[in-house]
Image: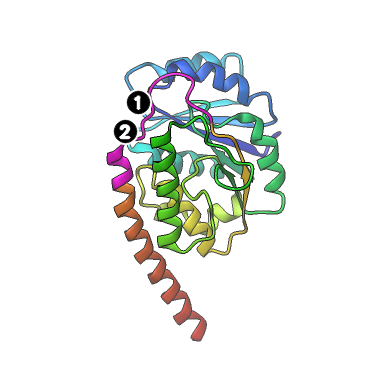
Amino acid sequence: MDNQNLVIIPTYNERDNIKPLVQRVFEYPVHLLCVDDRGSDDTAAEIARQQRKYPNLHLLQNPQRGGLGRAYVLGMQWGLDKGYQHLITMDADLSHDPKYLPTILAALQSNDVVIGSRYVASGDVSKFNLLRQMLSRFSSWYARTLLDLPIKDITSGFVGFRKNILEKINLAVIDSRGFIFQVETKLLASLHGGRVKEIPIAFGDRLHGASKMSAAIIFEAMFATWALRKRKQIMQATNTVQERK
């Protein structure tokens, strides 16, 4: 393989964002996999058109609509099977600026997980309206506090993983279907001894279309975080027993 870096982007009704996104991503030495969740706006057809220009653009269509978490798991497993060493997740709406890809890839040389963080020094969410800023900051604080993890932006979706940490996690055990996937993967990486680093990013507003974030999704994630807390306790107790044997 001539490139070890794979960017994974789930898509669902993102036709208007795909062309500029693909152009921006391929300014950098990466391959790109779009995992399409079979929306109604022919996003997959637009990706196929872009493949004529970009041979390192790949398309994986979810056999059945499964949500964000399922799309990421399918994409990560595809990337591991193909032998990529670094896998980076991004949003499809250009709220994650591809200009940070070189910084994330550089940090992955000495870390297992690199998070594009809105909430470390020099991070920025000023393009959010006040209500969304409050919801975003609260959900991140809530999850990291409940799970007792020293990660400022635990809900970030702009994340780089080394192959070895994803293999330790075992993607088959990931239960999340929605945005809570971002929290679950960081928790599992930490529990498996992964070295985690946060780098500051400025989070932008989507280029086209409406945000898929909603109050219902946030409340769902709040309850799901309690299940992750229980899972963490069980895993820690199991590891303690095994160490004593």
In the rendered image, which quarter is residue 14 located in? top left
In this rendered view, identify the residue nearer to me: 21 or 72.
21
Q: Position of residue 10 (x, y in %)?
A: 45, 32
Name the element at disc 2. loop
Quick check: can you spot residue 55?
no
Q: Give the class, few, some or many, for how many residues have Cα within 10 Å of label 1's Cα (few <14, many ≥20).
A: some
Report the magenta stretch's main SS: loop
Q: Amino acid at mark 1?
A: Arg
Residue 38 badge: 1
In the rendered image, which quarter is residue 229 located in? bottom left
Q: Is residue 131 above or below residue 220?
A: above
Magenta-drawn stretch contains 33 = no
Of the numbered discs 2 and 1, the one sitting upstream in the chain is: 1
Residue at the spot 52% in from the left edge and 48% down from the top edge? 153
Q: Position of residue 157 (x, y in %)?
A: 49, 41
Quick check: can you spot residue 30?
yes
The magenta stretch is 204-219
Residue at the spot 50% in from the left edge and 43% down from the top edge? 156
Q: Is residue 212 above or below residue 186?
A: above
Q: Amino acid at mark 2?
A: Arg
Magenta-drawn stretch contains 212 = yes
Residue 65 badge: 2
